[in-house]
Amino acid sequence: MHPTTHAEVAVLVLNWNGRSLLETFLPSWVQHTPAGADLIIVDNGSADDSVAFVREHYPEVRLHLFTENHGFAAGYNKAIAELDYKTVVLLNSDVELSRGWLDEPLRLLDSDPTIAAVQPTIRAQRDPKSFEYAGAAGGFIDSLGYPFCRGRLFGTLEEDHGQYATPTDLFWASGACLIIRRDVYLEVGGLDTIFFAHQEEIDLCWRLNARGHRIAFAPTSVVYHVGGASLSAESPRKVFLNFRNNLLMIYKNLPAPRLHRVLLCRFFLDFFAAFVYLLQLKPRHCYAVLEGWRCFMIKRQRYEEVRRENIAKTVRPLPTSLMKPYSLLVQYYFRGRRRYSDLSQ
């Protein structure tokens, strides 16, 4: 079903067998989606009664239906290509919205054409005073390709005391709540469907930055994310996707000669991580890391042309304010710096 209104903003929630999440979070989406935006549930071929639930209890909410599960990346790509809006919001189905959450992001986009995407402050829905793992106060990346956030380094989460309540440019914005210009999203190719899920938004943002667009943080916009609704943090499948996708992202986007040095370092570090999992009596997690590398080595051949295109379309080197010149592993484990504010800026 295509929208018949003339709204310029679409809030898109990708749903797959998420009846319980819809019951929990749809009330906040309806309440806090402003009148100038369309709330659209994009159903990814659900086999449960998600669609019937929306139709019965929220007939005013629009539905965009697929007959099969396309995954996170392809599902959003397909929906954004089919729905004609100026600005789209990629909103996870386990996010609770707050009053006025869309105001500052839209002001930023309207005020500066160089800004292509915006991320709000993302706090933990189960602990509203703390930042949430998948985004916190905006994402960056270190010299070896490890992503992290203001307010979250590895598994260490900070409480939000306003210490990062300042607008800033980001390396990446979280896919939990990503506000982005539709034309730019399509221009850079959208989310990589091979990734299926995990770090696909970081890869997208890398392309945005490299091609001259900016990603901004909106501190007064606040949303609350549960996280792990699809895959828990302890899932070997999640470990596999994170390692494989991170390597693919580095290969796709990092210019030579740094690429070869980074991959060599990552080879030793990732195999050490696999060994640690083994010592922790987590053989499935150990296997997931090794399988991530195996799949990366197979798929990198398919990405040679993609890599050439990305490098050719790169118009600026990424500044050290976005791609940090240090190793987060060294900062965190050897220097004991567990907060973003402790890191060298």
Image (spheres, helix red, strand yellow):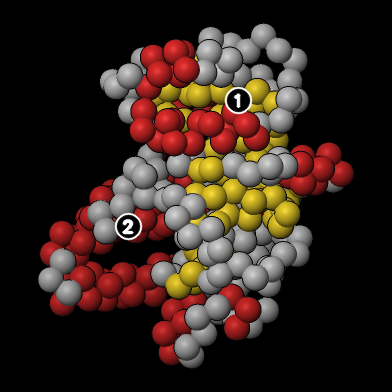
Residue labelled with disc 2: 233
Tell me if residue 295 comes above or below residue 54 in the rendering.
below
Mark 2 falls on what kind of element? loop
- Closer to viewer: mark 2 or mark 1: 1
The amino acid pointed to by label 1 is Leu
Measured from the top left, where is residue 92 in percent x and y? 49, 40
| Spatial CA span between label 2 and label 1 | 29 Å
Specify whether residue 304 is in view. Answer: no
Residue shown at 42%/85% (left/top)?
333
The local crowd at label 2, few if under 14, some if 14 to 19, many if 20 or more residues have their Cα within 10 Å, is few
Measured from the top left, where is residue 260 in percent x and y? 44, 68
Within the image, what quadrant is residue 149 found in?
Answer: bottom right
Residue labelled with disc 1: 39
Residue shown at 38%/39% (left/top)?
196
Residue 134 horizontal side relative to residue 137, left or right? left
Residue 282 horizontal side relative to residue 48, left or right? left
The amino acid pointed to by label 2 is Ala
Residue shown at 63%/55% (left/top)?
121
Residue 159 horizontal side relative to residue 230, left or right? right
Instruction: Give whichever of discs 2 and 1 has the lower sequence position.
Output: 1
Mark 1 falls on what kind of element? strand
Tell me if residue 335 comes above or below residue 4 in the rendering.
below
